[in-house]
Amino acid sequence: MAKINTEMIKELRARTNAGILDCKEALKETDGDMEKAVDFLRKKGLATALKRAGRETSEGVVNSYIHAGGKIGVLVEVNCETDFVAKTDEFKELVKNLAMHIAATRPLGIRSEDIPEEIVKREEEIYRAQALETGKPEKIIDKIVDGKMKKFYRESCLLEQQYVKDTDLTIQDLIHEMVSKMGESISVRRFARYQLGGE
């Protein structure tokens, strides 16, 4: 059993922003392995985030971001549980980063169910027509279409998109990390993206 010392706890705390007792527990659970302890805390944070997901979020911030010399603009509303969290620099930074991300990636909705039915149907039809061109059996074609639709949702739904500033994270991961740091439920309520000359 590895000896857990103060330096190890400090290093883990600096890397994860977790509490001292959580860091100590993580190092004990992983026999002093720093990388495994980081993973342990991330998983624990995710579990906490999921537990908090159902709680009411009636506070928050609306932020705007203007890009490309006034050619693209985004308004985004992100909610949390208390005014205290809404006023923190970290929360404001999260909302600002989300607005910048939306400007860059043009999501069609927050979740898959937010994407209009006609767009989803059109994409499915296009993928099916492309798959039929290959001459493969129907069972294989269904799998091809299913795979392409999953990719479409990953690229089109804000929460499933890879975060532009760190492609190892999805936007959902980014929000979960903030939830475990702040100890409150956080959700993206709505956004609007405008592009000069666009629809």
Image: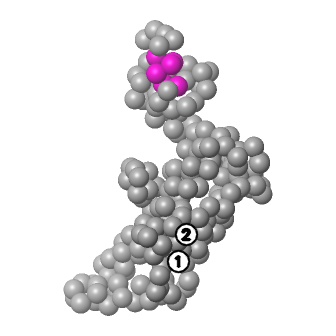
Q: Mark 1 falls on what kind of element?
A: strand
Can the viewer see residue 25 in this picture? no
Residue 162 horizontal side relative to residue 60, left or right: left
Please state the horizontal and vertical placement of residue 137, each as a whole percent of the image: 27, 84
- Picture disc at residue 51: none
Please state the horizontal and vertical placement of residue 46, each as a whole percent of the image: 57, 44
Instruction: Find disc 1 in the rendering and name its residue.
Output: 194
Instruction: Find disc 2 in the rendering and name its residue.
Output: 74
Residue 193 horizontal side relative to residue 137, left or right: right
Q: Distance between the residues labelled 1 and 2?
A: 6 Å
Place residue 145 in its image quadrant: bottom left
In the picture as drawn, the residue positioned furthest to the front comes out as 69
Q: For the N terminus, which image quadrant?
A: top left
Decide: marks 1, 2 in contact (CB < 8 A)?
A: yes
Residue 75 horizontal side relative to residue 84, left or right: left
Q: Which residue is drawn at 32% across and 76% down?
A: 144
Report the span colored magenta.
Answer: 8-13
Q: Mark 2 falls on what kind of element?
A: strand
Most foreground residue, 168 or 135: 168
